[in-house]
Image (cartoon, rainbow, N blue to C red):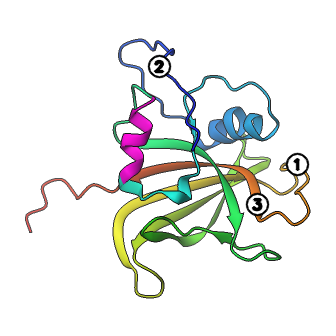
Amino acid sequence: MEIKPTSDIHLPPGFRFHPSDEELIVHYLKNKVASSPLPASIIADLDLYKYNPWDLPSLYLEKASFGEDEWYFFTPRDRKYPNGARPNRAAASGYWKATGTDKPILTSCGATNIGVKKALVFYKGRPPKGIKTDWIMHEYRLLETLAWNPKKKGSTRLDDWVLCRVRKKQPPQGHLG
């Protein structure tokens, strides 16, 4: 496990890290994949799929002074099968299940597709009898045309890096029941 220390970052009072989907793709994920400098060392490197989502906040907060409601990670994705294209999203005591369709991430002018966002929900247990939890993740990845890094022959690595935003869904306010 590698989590880059962020304790040397001094942020002003009131700082909130709420990047748009476009900012996550353009300024963070694209630079990470290309080994270019990041705007800040705010997003930790972590093999996310080795952990349960409820363990992530404490792992993240060990190295960061922010992240109260959602947490960001760079993580590699492995293949489910050696020659396949399906990602392995098994975790410590469950799995992340994709919901809905991939959402294209467009530039702010709406002209260019720069990446893809996938929504996932964490289920405890093993498929198909997993129990749905309140943990949600958005997984951001570059389009295949942008992810130019050649894959190593025989590697189970599907993507060198994807960017994940993890949060726990909160019950509706004022709900009596």
Label 2: how many Cα within 10 Å (few below 14, some 14–19, many 20+): few
Q: Name the disc covering residue 7, or none.
A: 2
Q: Mark 1 points at which residue?
A: 149
Residue 130 x, y percent position in the rendering: 40, 81
Residue at the spot x=35%, y=42% of the render? Answer: 69
Q: Distance between the residues labelled 3 and 2?
A: 30 Å
| Residue type at the position of mark 3 | Arg
50 vs 60, left or right, is right
Residue at the spot x=80%, y=47% of the render? Answer: 112
167 vs 116, left or right, is left
| Residue type at the position of mark 1 | Asn
Q: Distance between the residues labelled 2 and 1?
A: 31 Å
Residue 151 x, y percent position in the rendering: 88, 57
For label 2, the SS is loop
30 vs 117, left or right, is right
For label 1, the SS is loop
Q: Earlier in the sequence, mark 2 or mark 1?
A: 2
Q: Which of 177 and 57 is in front in this view?
A: 57
Residue 92 x, y percent position in the rendering: 46, 65
Q: Distance between the residues labelled 3 and 1?
A: 12 Å
Q: Measured along the vertical axis of the image, is residue 128 above or below residue 157?
A: below
Bounds of the magenta segment: 55-63
Of the two numbered discs 2 and 1 in the rendering, the one whose residue sits closer to the viewer: 2
148 vs 171, left or right, is right
| Residue type at the position of mark 2 | Ser
Q: Name the disc covering residue 15, or none.
A: none
Label 3: how many Cα within 10 Å (few below 14, some 14–19, many 20+): some
Q: Mark 3 points at which residue?
A: 157
Residue 61 part of the magenta-drawn span: yes
Q: Measured along the vertical axis of the image, is residue 32 above or below residue 64?
A: below
